[in-house]
Amino acid sequence: MADKKAQLVIEGAAPVELPILTGTVGPDVIDVRGLGATGHFTFDPGFMATASCESKITYIDGDKGILLHRGYPIEQLAEKSDYLETCYLLLNGELPNAEQKAQFVSTVKNHTMVHEQLKSFFNGFRRDAHPMAVMCGVVGALSAFYHDSLDINNPQHREISAVRLVAKMPTLAAMVYKYSMGQPMMYPRNDLSYAENFLHMMFNTPCEIKPISPTLAKAMDRIFILHADHEQNASTSTVRLAGSSGANPFACIAAGIAALWGPAHGGANEAVLTMLDEIGDVSNIDKFIAKAKDKNDPFKLMGFGHRVYKNRDPRATVMKQTCDEVLRELGIKNDPQLELAMRLEEIALTDPYFIERSLYPNVDFYSGIILKAIGIPTSMFTVIFALARTVGWISHWKEMLSSPYKIGRPRQLYTGYEARDIVKLEDRK
């Protein structure tokens, strides 16, 4: 609601009145859309002070360490809910009742298989390709296999595409892993839960089917929940921008995966393990801690602090508990990398330098340790992030299409040449 107005004074022109919009929670927002009529527009690299859309899905208060999905704190969802229930919440706005949940879970399970011909699509990739490269390709290719529901103006088609994406992403992610390993791809099992099924497809083979540990399945489910959505981040904004052009949902999600691939975004938990490799041994920690504190040294401790959260990452508290449960279940001992990670955690939680700067271990730090402990290679970390985040992306895509929207078209501050004439090639110096 626009109860208040701001006044912008431009030298030599009449003052411009701009409405101030108030959301449910969070700071007020100045509506600058009317500024274009004056021949001016705003300059905000990185969109640090610009709201690109209105949304009812997720709210973050970085100063207070708050993350809400449809109003529910992430800690409660991780503790009292499961991933598919969280998916239903993000997609539909409310938690399901028992009947709605049973129907939703059944529908998702009915879509877990992918077109058999899609398996041959993998043969075009090198076996040593990065899993995210393969994931981008196969998700984008889904539109060639499921073109019966690509009318984005049809609400039923949007629902079918949303369910297909949520259902098929674990299957595709596991197929990407199995392809890289040279192992047979495993079909999904609909008698298992979402997380159990993913671990089954990842680690079982046709000649040996092992039971799935409830502790590891719970940990995997929590990783999915804690990565399901995170407001208007780079990949979500990319999905919305691609969707604003009218692109099909599979193309939009492939665009989101491409954006997530960046090490500053989805590659953060992979970067944690890379950092641990660089440190090498517990005996080197003091040296690297000193490097991290040195303003003139480019070295950074990955997995500590967060661009949004100026307090503790609310997801990290749940993830730490889960991390402890997994390590206890697996009884991992004498793993130098995990020993190194636990020592870094201890320092970050007690050293005044880290405490004063709120450089607490974040969700990427703990999820990286958990995934390594489970046996998932670092190259697959971002694929799993994409799997979990798909429901957030598709929820934002659906929300945008269900309301009036315009194609995204950011402006720019041009600092290049003014108009000039071409000089003949022989006369150029």
Image (cartoon, rainbow, N blue to C red):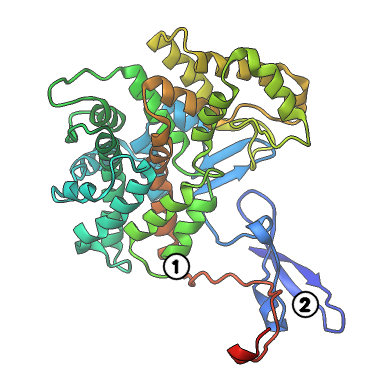
Residue tagged by mark 1?
244
Q: Residue at x 59, y 88 (%)?
A: 425
The residue nearer to you, when weighing 168 against 78, is 168
Residue tagged by mark 2?
16
Cα distance between the residues tagged 2 and 1: 29 Å
The residue nearer to you, when weighing 90 against 271, is 271
6 lies left or right of 52: right
Sequence-wise, which precedes: disc 2 or disc 1?
Answer: 2
* Pair 2/1: label in front: 1
**91 versus 318 height, above or below:** below
Q: Secondary structure at mark 1?
A: loop
Q: Residues within 10 Å of mark 1 (few under 14, many from 20)?
A: some
Give how far across and how far down residue 360 sits, in percent.
Answer: 65, 27
Q: Amino acid at mark 2?
A: Val
Q: Secondary structure at mark 2?
A: strand
Q: Amino acid at mark 1?
A: Ser
Residue 372 makes an appearance in the image? yes
Q: Residue at x 69, y 74 (%)?
A: 41
